[in-house]
Structure formats: structure tokens, C-alpha cells
Amino acid sequence: MADLDSKYRPHLEAQLEPGEELRGLCVASQQKGMFKGGSAVIGTTDRRLLLQSLDRRGDPDGEPQSILPEGIVSVKAGPAGGGWINVDTAILDHAAVRLQIQTTDGEKIKLMLMRGEGKLLGGLGGGDTQRQGLDALAGWFRA
């Protein structure tokens, strides 16, 4: 199986505007309804987030959603077990993180992210690419 970076970076970079930099990418599970969900890749750039849905095979499905800072009404993050805390701290300090973004058009994006650490399950959780992507995501929210 290809690593996250080689599998998804070319697709996300093709979506960038001139001069825009892809700083990191990570995978997440996305809740789309009460009993419906899927997987997604989050690309963090210097300007926006790119949320790319994935099909059952893990391939990009449709066009990515572009999320600009001014398009976000609120964001909450916390450990997968519960409780909301500071967004960038939650992303960096927990093995599994819930992230909820509410956009100006009323959409609620609910994501679960793994940190991708540890020798046993780290590679399955995305490894270095996942960790670097989460660091980039936390930095984007911090800025």
C-alpha cells in the first residue's frame, strides 16, 4: 500500500492556487449523518483547508471542499472520549481527536483523527505523514 503522502499529495497539489503551499495532509473519518460516514483527507495549506472525501477504496471522490478561515463560524476539538478543549492543543496532545467545524453556511463537519504514533499501530494510523499533517492543521488553527 502506498503511503499517505505519495497517494494523496499529487491530487491535493493539483487543487492549489498559484503560490499556495500544501503544508500537510492527514486522513480522518467523517461523520456525514446519524448512521452514515466515510473517510476524508484534510490538506492544510497556507490559505485554507481542503477536505477531500474518499471512496471505499480510499481514492478521491468528487471535488474537494475548500474551507477558508473566514468561512468558519466555530470550531471545537477534544479527545475522542469526550470534552471540548483548545483546538490546537487537542490536535497535538491526544492519540485520537474529534474535530467539529461549523461553517458560515450552517454546515457542521465532524471529523475523527488519529495521531498515527507508536511502533505497533503508528504506521496503520498514517505514520509520519499523519503526524506532520496534524501539526500543520494545529498550526493553521493557531494562526
Image (tube, rainbow, N blue to C red):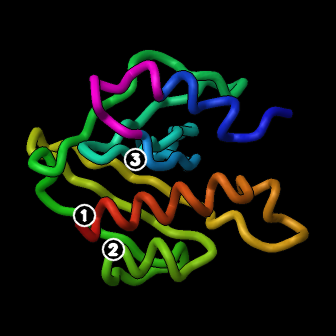
Q: Amino acid at mark 2?
A: Val
Instruction: Tell me how far mark 2 sits from mark 1, CA to CA.
Output: 7 Å
- Residue located at (52% from left, 46% from top): 25
Q: Given contact means CB atoms under 8 Å apart, are the residues at marks 1 and 3 in contact?
A: no
Q: Which residue carries the number 3 mark?
A: 44
Q: Is the residue 123 above or below the residue 82 in the image? A: above
| Image spot of residue 140 (x, y percent) | 31, 60
Q: Amino acid at mark 1?
A: Val
First along the sequence among labels 2 and 1: 1
Instruction: Tell me how far mark 3 sits from mark 2, CA to CA.
Output: 15 Å
Q: Which residue carries the number 2 mark?
A: 87
**Which segment is the magenta one?**
13-21
Nearest the eye: 61 or 137: 137
SS class, disc 3: strand
Q: Which residue carries the number 1 mark?
A: 75
Judged from this view, the residue extending furthest toward the front is 19
- Residue located at (74% from left, 58% from top): 127
- Front position among marks 1 and 3: 3
For label 3, the crowd category at 10 Å Cα-Cα, with few meaning under 14, some 14 to 19 and many 20 or more, is many
Instruction: Tell me how far mark 1 sits from mark 3, CA to CA.
Output: 15 Å
Q: Amino acid at mark 3?
A: Thr
